[in-house]
Image (tube, helix red, strand yellow):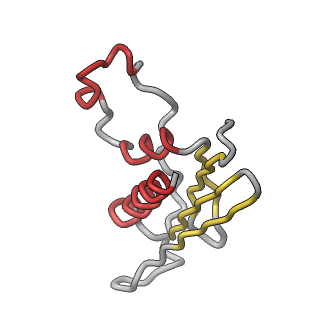
């Protein structure tokens, strides 16, 4: 699970670095961007959140694009052009969602079930 959590953080932070455009109210031209990584543990659950300064909702994949059994050895060829990082996050975590952050921005969350049940 440690490797999965590391990869999830890497994908979510990478999305912020490559795709996020901060809301006008949160940054000035040339100013540094803020990225917060939140880790919360409860008995049976691990929550990871990555917050940014762009209130635009993320493109969370709706589900499987193609059945892995049908894709076979060609799985890479049928991956979508966009959203691959979030698709990886959805495959590794037990749940993925996002929430708005005031006065602007958002947090993308994921949950890992520590007891092995979903």
Residue 69, relative to residue 62: is it above or below? above
For the C terminus, give its image quadrant. Answer: top right
Provide residue 79's location: percent of width, then percent of height: 31, 32
**Could you say which quadrant of the image residue 47 lies in?**
bottom right
**Could you say which quadrant of the image residue 30 lies in?**
bottom left
Q: Which residue is depicted at the point 55% across and 67% down? A: 51
Provide residue 105's location: percent of width, then percent of height: 56, 67
Q: Which residue is depicted at the point 35% across and 14% down? A: 70
Residue 80, relative to residue 88: is it above or below? above
Camera-nearest residue between 74 and 78 = 74
Camera-nearest residue between 27 and 47 = 47
Provide residue 27's location: percent of width, then percent of height: 46, 81
**Could you say which quadrant of the image residue 93 lies in?**
top right
Q: Residue furthest right?
A: 43
Camera-nearest residue between 51 and 55 = 51
Q: Which residue is depicted at the point 61% across and 43% down? A: 95
């Amino acid at each position: 699970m440690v490797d999965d959590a590391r990869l999830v953080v890497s994908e979510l932070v990478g999305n912020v670095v490559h795709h996020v455009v901060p809301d006008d109210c949160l940054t000035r031209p040339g100013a540094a961007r803020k990225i917060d990584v939140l880790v919360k543990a409860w008995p049976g659950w691990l929550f990871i959140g990555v917050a940014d300064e762009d209130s635009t909702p993320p493109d969370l994949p709706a589900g499987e694009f193609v059945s892995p059994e049908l894709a076979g050895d060609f799985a890479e060829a049928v991956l979508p052009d966009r959203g691959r990082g979030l698709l990886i996050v959805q495959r590794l975590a037990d749940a993925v969602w996002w929430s708005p952050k005031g006065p602007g921005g958002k947090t993308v969350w994921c949950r890992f079930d520590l007891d092995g049940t979903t």
